[in-house]
Amino acid sequence: MINVIGLGYIGLPTALMFAKSGVEVIGTDINMKLIESLSNGKLTFEEDGLEELFKDAVDKGIKFTTDYQKTNTYIIAVPTPYINSSKKLDPRYVIAAINSVLDVCERGSILIIESTISPGSIDRYIRPEIINRGFRIGEDVHLVHAPERIIPGNMIYELEHNSRTIGADDPIVGEKVKKLYSNFCKSEIIVTDIRTAEMSKVVENTYRDINIAFANELAKICRADNMDVYEIIRIANKHPRVNILQPGPGVGGHCISVDPWFLVGDYPDLTNLILTARKVNDSMPTYVLSRIRDIMREHKITDISKIGIYGLTYKENVDDTRESPTLQLLKRMDEHLAFGVKVFDPFVKERIVDHQFMNFEDFLNEIEILVIMVGHDHIKNNMNLIKDKIILDTRNVCSFEGIYKL
């Protein structure tokens, strides 16, 4: 039996995938409301294919509880935020989960940490905790790091088709965990040491952050000299060794906007490029705010309540708002005493900010300037409703004339 600890965006799909594959799974989370919802057959977030996967897993007998289970295999998928002041990993949730596992686990248990952690975190935080509890690593418990590699909006496919990395102290244990993940993972599974596994995950997301920062800096350069950044990127990407990503209003989510900070926090003297990229991407909500100001001035609009922000999630076609550029933008507005801006997102079904609308047409009726922060399919399918608005399109989804871009 596997006990999956933490049933959020990573832990729940992983637990369901194991269960569907015929592995006995019990999912554990400290959130009683979440456990009650899952036990009653109701998912806690939306994701393509998740409903069908959930039904399959329930049919195979998956259970949900707030109690840690006595077993020999644990997958820990709890949050790993960073400390804002130091940019270092905040390991408290992982440490708490490890201690709760140690309270109940069988001798020889395998503790698999899927949560993304900074390089060296297991050596710094987890091993000492286990040793202080009187457990012998490699005998009483075995440590493994198998960093998650999925993205909201495409979780089910990526769980099956993305390659995986298994970092283990003991290669034999690593191969055992590899066989476990082979129940559903159809791609290559690489077994390596723990620190390499820690570093590889952080490096993947840092690479993308730097590429996005380059695109965002290009957007600022092109705006300064009246050039079309999208056309320039399109042409440059014709080169066989060039692949520039698209600029945007900022970087959100719990991976790309967080993981690079782990390296900055741990290696402050060695991460000049990474730090600069983080600063560029973090500056984009403020840059969007400056574009809104310029458009308001051009059209002699002084009432901030005539501004409508479309999109609260950090990416298209998901309901995940973690580290969302729109939330960052609203915070900047609040700091500048700019109150009353309207907000709408078809995927966010509960009100999480002031002046959030639940009906799209009601939202449009209240605004003059529409700022597209997320390129949901919903907005692409409703271009006829917005064509008469003044539009700032930060996602390059509008094709008609007179649109303002980054």
Image (cartoon, rainbow, N blue to C red):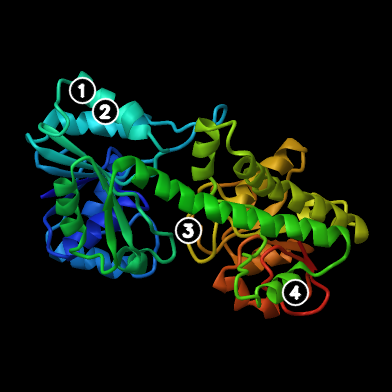
Q: Position of residue 13 (x, y in %)?
A: 30, 58
Q: Kindly indicate the quadrant of the structure image that contains residue 291.
A: bottom right
Q: Earlier in the sequence, mark 3 or mark 2?
A: 2
The CA distance from mark 3 to mark 2 is 36 Å
Give the image location of residue 141, x and y in percent: 14, 34
Q: Is residue 291 above or below residue 260?
A: below
User: Which residue, given by chain and number where applicable, does mark 4 sit on?
Assistant: 231
The residue located at (71%, 76%) in the rendering is 235
Name the secondary structure under disc 4: helix
- Looking at the image, the residue that sits furthest to the left is 107
Mark 3 surroundings within 10 Å by alpha-carbon count, few (fewer than 14), some (14 through 19), many (20 or more): many
- Residue type highlighted by circle 1: Ile
Looking at marks 4 and 3 on the same chain, the residue that comes earlier in the sequence is marked by 4
Residue name at image x 16 percent, y 57 percent: 180
Q: Are marks 4 and 3 in contact (CB under 8 Å)?
A: no
Quadrant containing the C terminus in the rendered view: bottom right
Q: Are marks 2 and 1 in contact (CB under 8 Å)?
A: yes
Q: Residue under circle 3?
A: 319
Q: Nearer the viewer, residue 71 or 53?
A: 71
Q: Which residue is mark 1?
A: 131
Identity of the amino acid at label 3?
Answer: Asp
